[in-house]
Amino acid sequence: MDFMTIILAAGKGTRMCSNLPKVVHKVNGIPMICKIIGEIEKLNPQKNIVVLGHMKEIVEKAIEEKIIGKNAKIEYVLQEEQLGTGHAVLSTKGNFSEYNGDIMLLYGDTPLLRSQTLSDFYEYHKKSDATTTVMTTICENPYGYGRIIKDNNQVKKIIEEKEASTEEKKIKEVNAGVYCFKSRDLLNALDKINNNNEKGEYYLTDVISIQVSENKNIKSYILTDNVEVMGVNSKIELAEASKILRTRKNNELMKDGVILIDPDNTYIEENVEIGKDTVIYPGANLQGRTKIGENSEIIGNTRIIDSILGNNVKIENSVIEESIVENYVTIGPFAHLRKGSHLKEYVHIGNFVETKKSTLEKGVKSGHLTYLGDTHVGENTNIGAGTITCNFDGINKFKTEIGRDAFIGSDSILVAPVVIGDNALIGAGSVITKNVPDNALSVERNKQLIKTGWRKK
């Protein structure tokens, strides 16, 4: 669309009671500032001007990690002193002084706004040929909000609670804090605002007053769902916003064919993708950019982070981090896939099996009590209970290579670097420190010693 945005994100957010800037706190897995930019980006604006202040490096880093990879057009402006919303916009003048188009202004702490709402808002602004359009909403209890004073559908004033008369306080249409401006008219008004007030700050609402005095066309766009413009100013409101986003996400997934047994107790973050007819049971926690295919089952208190799962996968009470799980794999209960694990088709890992930076080829089975670190396991190999790959000598990590159709007996210790050949058999209870060739049997055990009557002594 033919507009650019200004996003105000310079405030400290003291009511958050946090060491972090307010706008980087996460709502359903995404920093608030990234959520609002993500919604705006769906409309393809010419650019986004983000006003930073308090702990700007942290905010910028959050945006870079979550948004820049999507080729969003971001420009940062530093507001050295926080002297009001008008002052924040004044600090951006140099970024649009040569621009002749529309500017949408938003706040970085309103993560519930939808892209469709912003699109409808902008279309209304264009069709009404307004100099400025103010997004408003109706509040049954408008206490604390700026009231919208209108005459013949023209906005004449935005008056704050403390300045409103008794009659004005009865007005239920309030300022939602989102605006569309014609850029040249905004620049003109910014040149005229001042800080002659009790706090010595520059108020953005003064732009409206100036434009009204110049008989400009000022419109209001009434948003019916006032939840969308909820600002997040405390940890309580943060939790409320996250809950709303989770509900939206869960509803979208169910509309697309995902089965959620108990949506109220299923935690699925914003960027998770799930195929139809996959069943998600209560207690699941799906995070980051996780993708799950069709006809899968995620059971119990399973946590999956930034991982890719195929079709017909079954996971029970397990943790999967930054890993790839292909079709028809079964995992758990109580398994742990650490970063860099890759389980190919028909692999099974069971109770208390842990993998890290390991690839298990098609059909590998490891039923219980096993650690596979920095390991490659060939097709159809069976890993017995209690097997451990010793991949770390205290300084360096080493790789274990296990061939196809091998059988690793229970309670075996494979000391890397070591290679176990195809179709090899490792006897139970062995400590393997040397390579084992294809088709070989390797057993390493001390001679069993029996001393009768020992316990009586």
Image: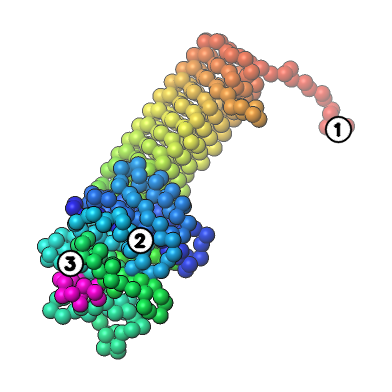
In the displayed structure, would residue 99 be above or below residue 428? below
Query: What residue occupies the far right of the structure in this picture?
Result: 457
Marking on residue 179 = none
Which residue in the protein does label 1 denote? 456
**Badge 2 local density, few (<14 within 10 Å), some, or many (20+)?**
some
Mark 1 or mark 3: which comes first in sequence?
3
Percent across and percent down for residue 201 are 39, 73
Residue 29 at x, y percent in the picture = 40, 52
| Element carrying mark 3 | loop
Which residue occupies 46% across, 32% down?
A: 341
Q: Quadrant of residue 110?
A: bottom left
Q: Which residue is mark 2?
A: 91
Residue closest to the eye, 17 or 11 = 11
Q: Amino acid at mark 2?
A: Ser
Which of the pair 322/56 is nearer the observer? 56
Query: What type is the residue that disc 1 sits on?
Result: Lys
| Residue type, mark 3 in image | Thr
Q: Earlier in the sequence, mark 2 or mark 3?
A: 2
Q: Nearer the viewer, mark 2 or mark 1?
A: 2
- Left or right of residue 344, residue 274 in this image: left
* Kind of element beneath mark 1: loop
Chain part drawn in magenta: 208-220
Residue corresponding to mark 3: 131
Q: CA distance from mark 2 to mark 1?
A: 88 Å
* Image position, residue 283 (x, y; %): 43, 52
* Residues at marks 2 and 1 touching, judged by CB atoms closer than 8 Å: no
Residue for point 55% across, 22% down = 400
Locate the C terminus by quadrant. top right
